[in-house]
Image (cartoon, rainbow, N blue to C red):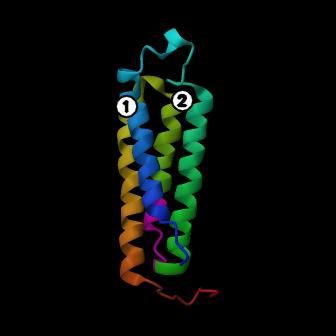
Amino acid sequence: MRSKINWDALGIGASIACAIHCALLPLFLTSLPLFGINIIHHLGFEIGMILLALGVGTYSLWHGYRYHHHSLQPLLLFFSGFIFLVLKQFFHQYETWLLIPAVILIVTAHLINFKSCRVHNHAHAEDCDH
């Protein structure tokens, strides 16, 4: 039996993992630099998490848009949240205030996409090429 990856669930998980990393990791792991490990505000790690969220989210939402519901709402919500996520990297003094709407918008986009894919299952529009 062939298993399928639920990209929305993976996107929601990646978004929540990112939120936990950004919000809680500094509280619990402030002693890591004593051991020579510093992933808190490490630019490479941050960029990696952002690129992971972008890749998983874009694939998941594009797949739902193209093959199921043809609604741009999840994509618009996702990219709006993603703008906040990127801005967080440049405006560190507003990190929490930018992170909260980023996570809310990204998770909401995945939830709407997930529900829309289940409701429409395989809706076809005039622009379908499959």
Q: Is residue 1 above or below residue 114?
A: below
Residue shown at 47%/86% (left/top)? 123
Q: Which residues are the magenta region?
A: 69-77
For residue 102, say whether it is visible.
no
Count of marks overlaid on the render: 2
**Residue located beneath label 1 in the image:** 23
Q: Dot 2 surroundings within 10 Å: few (below 14), some, or many (20 or more)?
A: few
Residue shown at 43%/22% (left/top)? 93
Image x and y of residue 75, in percent: 49, 62
**Which residue is situated farthest in the front direction here?**
1
For residue 17, say whether it is visible.
yes
Q: Secondary structure at mark 1?
A: helix
Image x and y of residue 76, in percent: 47, 60
Q: Dot 1 surroundings within 10 Å: few (below 14), some, or many (20 or more)?
A: some
Query: Label 2 sits on what residue type?
Result: Phe
Q: Is residue 10 left or right of residue 28?
A: right
Image x and y of residue 113, in percent: 42, 68
Q: Is residue 80 left or right of residue 97?
A: right
In front: label 1 or label 2: 1
Which labelled disc corresponds to residue 90?
2
Quadrant of image for the C terminus: bottom right
Q: Main secondary structure of the magenta part?
A: helix
Which labelled disc corresponds to residue 105?
none
Q: Tell me if residue 75 is in the magenta stretch.
A: yes
Instruction: Give how far apart the Cα atoms at labels 1 and 2 are.
Output: 17 Å
Query: Label 1 sits on what residue type?
Result: Ala
